[in-house]
Amino acid sequence: MNGRQRLPGQRPLLRTLLVAAGWTVVALGGTFALDPFRNYQLALVAAYLCATAGLTVLVGATGQLSLGHAALMAVGGYGFALTTNALPFGGIPAFVLALLVGALASAVVGLLLGLAAARLSGPYLAGLTLAVVVALPAVASTWSTALHGDQGVQIPFEGVPDALRRVVALEQWQAMVAVVVTAAVVTGLTVLRGGRFGLRMLAVRDDEVAARLSGIPAGRVKVLAFTASSVAAGVGGGVLCFVAQAVSPGAYTVGFSLLLVVAVVIGGLGSILGAALGSVVIVLLPWLIGRLTSSLPADAAQRLDGNLAVLVFGLLLITVMAVAPHGLHGALVARRRRTSRRPTGDGPRPTEEPAPRKVLVPTEEQR
């Protein structure tokens, strides 16, 4: 057999890359069919997908619950903004360099959290990550000289490149950039989860003691998984800063961090497609609720502003968990399996017993 043997559960790399390239081309082509506001929403979905994809791999593959991915997105956003303001040049090279710096800053913070996560589990780990989000405004106020406190950091306006200015609008260009960056992040996470390291993460999640006895360094696997998830969240924060042209601690609150977890649970833990579905939900649902409340009287709209969205998300989460415990992706997979098992009408039905076969017993003379 030529090459290395692929282990059970591993996915072929070439197929993963081709599928990612195909979906990326479809998403880029879809930007030409959307109006500017829809392209802006698509860019938001792409930015959130970076964080939710990393979070669903972390929770679904290793069982580590993080409530602080909003803070990791903020670290990536601040790294992107500060680097962009410090660079003497602009354009795509500045964007790539600033995005790498933001991802590196998130990786460092994620590594520190991962070292603590290797010794903690359950509510202790969730409490630690939640404390990071709670401390974010205090950190921004303490380092107000660089982070500008509650006002945040703004970046210089960067329009569409000259070569595309007559063809692509600003919102479409931002959506295209967000789609390409998110495609790279999601593809990297898919390859990571579908390879040998993904099998190690599953082994640690299912039985950490058995994994250690099998020679798998469980602590190292947890730290690396948390770091990879943090890098994805940091890239999402950088993309969000690129789209919003600013970053501030008010955009990365405890509520937003919990909303990322809700998106992962609604979409389906451990599923990249589920993370995408959850990201679409947390972008479109508040917009739909805002459209609904805007038609109400001013007094009622002011009272429902923010509160109605929390109520709807809570009811949606309860409904999805009651109807589809494995999330929207799990419901789609279950429906596909039921459809594939449905009889087509040709041949005997699965419930019918096949006709008994006739067994010819040789006679004495034939023996």
Image (cartoon, rainbow, N blue to C red):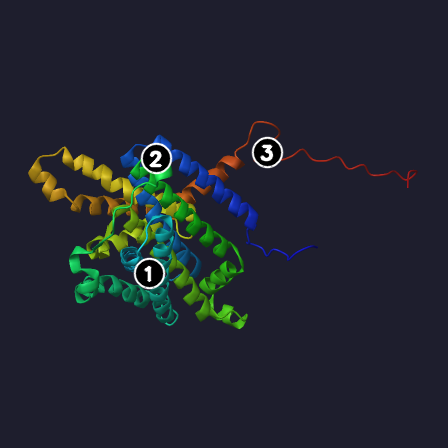
* Disc number for residue 115: none
Q: Amino acid at mark 3?
A: Glu
Q: Secondary structure at mark 2?
A: loop
* Disc number for residue 168: 2
Is 128 in front, or is 332? 128
Quarter of the figure with the C terminus: top right
Q: Secondary structure at mark 1?
A: loop
Foreground disc of the pair 1, 2: 2
Q: Residue furthest left?
A: 299
**Marks 3/1: CA distance?**
50 Å
Q: Amino acid at mark 2?
A: Val
Q: Secondary structure at mark 3?
A: loop
Q: Is residue 326 left or right of residue 259?
A: right
Q: Is any part of residue 324 visible from this angle?
A: no
How crowded pointer 3 is (Cα within 10 Å; few <14, some 14-19, many 20+) is rated as few
Residues marked 1 and 2 touching at CB (< 8 Å): no
The location of residue 104, given as percent across then percent down, is: 37, 62
Quarter of the figure with the N terminus: bottom right
Mark 1 and mark 2 lie on one chain; the one further toward the N terminus is 1
Q: Which residue is mark 3?
A: 352
Q: Residue furthest right?
A: 365
Q: Residue at x 55, y 32 (%)?
A: 343
Foreground disc of the pair 3, 1: 1
* Disc number for residue 66: 1
Mark 3 and mark 1 lie on one chain; the one further toward the N terminus is 1
The location of residue 308, given as percent across then percent down, is: 18, 43
Q: Amino acid at mark 1?
A: Ser
How crowded pointer 1 is (Cα within 10 Å; few <14, some 14-19, many 20+) is rated as many
**Marks 1/2: CA distance?**
38 Å
Mark 3 and mark 2 lie on one chain; the one further toward the N terminus is 2
Is 92 in front, or is 219? 92
